[in-house]
Amino acid sequence: LAFGRQLLEFSEITVSLMSLFQVILGDFDYSSLHKVNRVLAPLIFVSFVVLMFFIMLNMILAVVMKTYEQVHTDLQGVAKNEVTGMSLMRQRTKEFIHLLTA
């Protein structure tokens, strides 16, 4: 609505969506937006980029948290002393000493 009459990239809804997708990927022509409207262009552009940044960050965090949850549930069945580093090192040292003395 803001740039559709002056710019071909925002003349139709499908072309606008493709242009916004290109902005997300980093392939955009900001100077043409700035030429059309010097006040509204930075406001809309920066708000869109910030909004997309937080949406993408939220998606990445959701994947990381889901993976953490799966690993956490998998490790609940394992004894705590097997998971900690010191007890695992003690166990491996005892096994190694047992192999040397046998």
Image: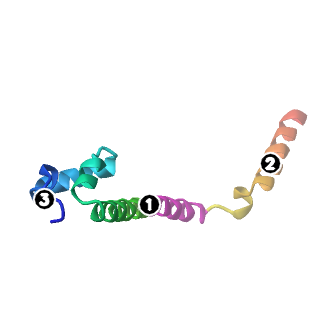
Residue 31, x across and y down, in percent:
29, 48
Marks 3/2: CA–CA distance: 66 Å
Q: Are marks 3 and 2 in contact (CB under 8 Å)?
A: no
Label 3 sits on what residue type?
Answer: Gly
User: For numbered disc 1, what is the local secondary structure?
Assistant: helix
Residue sitting at x 21%, y 56%? 36
User: For numbered disc 3, what is the local secondary structure?
Assistant: loop
Residue sitting at x 24%, y 49%? 32
User: For numbered disc 2, what is the local secondary structure?
Assistant: helix
* Residue 57 numbered mark, or none: 1
Label 2 sits on what residue type?
Answer: Met
Q: Are marks 2 and 1 in contact (CB under 8 Å)?
A: no
Residue 61, x across and y down, in percent:
47, 62
82 vs 65, left or right, is right
* Residue 89 numbered mark, or none: 2
Instruction: Pick the quarter of the image with the C terminus.
Output: top right
Look at discs 3 and 2 and give the one toward the viewer: 3
Which span is picked out in magenta? 61-77
Residue sitting at x 49%, y 63%? 65
For the stretch drawn in magenta, what is the main secondary structure?
helix
Give the mark nearer the N terminus: 3 vs 2: 3
Which residue is tagged 3? 4
Q: Is residue 72 magenta?
A: yes
Residue 18, x across and y down, in percent:
19, 51
Towards the viewer: 76 or 41: 41
Q: Is residue 64 magenta?
A: yes
Report crowding for label 3: few under 14, some 14 to 19, many 20 or more residues within 10 A (C-alpha): some
Towards the viewer: 29 or 34: 34
Marks 2/1: CA–CA distance: 37 Å
Towards the viewer: 24 or 84: 24
Residue 85, x across and y down, in percent:
76, 53
Marks 1/3: CA–CA distance: 29 Å
